[in-house]
Image (cartoon, grey):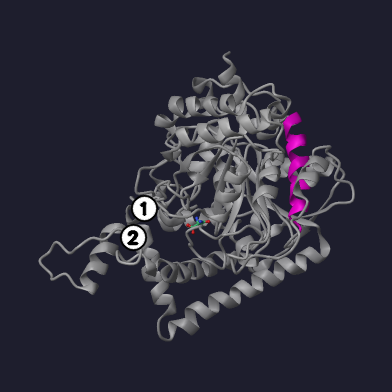
Amino acid sequence: MSKSAQLIGLSAAQLSEKLQTGEISAVEATQAHIDRIADVDEAVHAFLTGTSDQALQTASEVDRQRAAGEDLHALAGVPIALKDNIVTKGITTTCASRMLADWNPVYSATVAQRIADAGLPLLGKTNMDEFAMGSTTETSAFGPTHNPWDLNCHPGGSGGGSAAALAAYSTPLALGSDTGGSIRQPGAVTGTVGVKPTYGSVSRYGVIALASSLDQVGPAARTVLDAALLHELIAGYDPRDNTSLNAPVAPVVAAAREGATGDLRGVRIGVITELAGEGYQEDVRLRFAENLDALRQTGAEVVEVSCPNIEHALAAYDVLNAAEASSNLARFDGMRFGQRVEPSDGRPVTVDTVMSASRGAGFGLEVKRRILLGIYALSGENYETVFANAQRVRSVVTEELLAAFKAVDVLVSPTSPAPAGPLGDGKENPEALLHSDVGTIAANLAGTPAMSVPAGLSENNLPVGLQIIAPQRADDRMYRVGAALETALQERWGAPLLAQAPALGQMKVEVSK
Ligand code: GLN
């Protein structure tokens, strides 16, 4: 096994350790992942843009700084990939839309800047559903991403590119954005870890907005500890984001290390009754029951909690998401932002015709569907009967979660009702697929943190995830529980679970514990 093939099997924490002792260089770590992408990304298509030259430049700068004895961030030299709705200066940022196909930003998102400042080589920008609308990465204008567990399946969405890149060992770390589950659901169906931090705890400056009252940037990784290391790097106050929390960052790295010992005595875990029954695939329920047993064995107390209105969360989300999206996407008109297209049907070139031609050509069907639905929900008396009602449902769901947290420390559910489906699902039946978010959106409505951790395999060998929800600003609690489950399941399934992906057999990777 070549050194390069060994390096891609390491976690970010392991890479960080070897970089710090000088056992490996940042250039070696980066080159190994660039080679991996060259080998497998034609089949996986996790990346829209590769930035290998820039990554190697960052890596050699880190190596130089380390040789000079400079003080470096623990993740300096550990490569990363960013979802393509995170704005990167000088690097094409498309949001997987024709509308932004050629956009070369003149500034970087705060999270991208923090990552650059800490010396993480950027491998590239990852595929996603267009403007983050979807659950399979198939609404991308640039072709779908394939799930490394089964290349005929989708990798979830909207952040399927980041999750698939992790599962294919093309990167040890990635960032996503989560409006209704877009970090957690792809994590669940690719056997990786996906985290939506507390609303407002990670800056969204320079992250192309979908629904601003729900959007949150978060880490994706293959282990809970890796996600925690990245979480602490990106979280914290940013005066450029007016929803940014000016509060200390939860100590998630310490919590992940504590949880990894497998001891959860004194922790109360609530099972959301309504999110584990009807509509959930049988083997998802089986794994969930096993996961609860594993959690009981850590010493945690597991109790049932009812949130009867959570089933209405999805309908409320659909309205609020569309309403906010229709407003956020108004700026892409071919004049202020986005590709300009002049009418080709003989109409004169006016402000109106250029806007309509630009939006007609630039947006895909799902984006148009949501803009229309959003405008409908906000128009005339619908504002009161549709939009305001959805807001009321949002308040009720939020109150139910808050009430539940009076009795328990964290809440758990399966992340998604089913494992990854075949490619084609997203295009044929977008409405039905929205159902895959049934368990994830409550955390967005309530602004609470939530994460998905690998929770075992379905009957046909596809990963499923367990979701952990914590109260606002108590992100550390879910990391502790997530790490404990990870430890327990490594005993059950062998470590790490991801190494069992059948497609990875052909893609050759040796994973070290
Ligand atoms: N699947 C959800 C949707 O299409 C989630 C989107 C997201 O979190 N960005 O709205």
Q: Residue at x 57, y 58 (%)?
A: 438
In this rendered view, identify the residue nearer to me: 124 or 165: 124
Amino acid type of the residue that numbered disc 1 sits on in the rendered structure: Trp
Furthest residue to the right?
Answer: 266
The answer to whether 407 is drawn above or below residue 231 in the figure is: below
Report which residue position mark 2 lands on.
338
Q: Is residue 466 left or right of residue 269?
A: left
Disc 1 on helix, strand or loop? Answer: loop
Which image quadrant is residue 216 in? bottom right
Which label's residue is closer to the chain start, 2 or 1?
Answer: 1
Amino acid type of the residue that numbered disc 2 sits on in the rendered structure: Gly
Q: Which quarter of the rendering shows the C terminus? A: top right
The x, y position of residue 141, in whole percent, is 34, 49
Give the number of the disc on residue 363: none
Give yes or no for contact between labels 2 and 1 (Cβ–Cβ under 8 Å): yes
Report which residue position mark 1 lands on.
103
Q: Specify whether residue 483 is painted magenta.
A: yes
Magenta part of the chain: 474-491
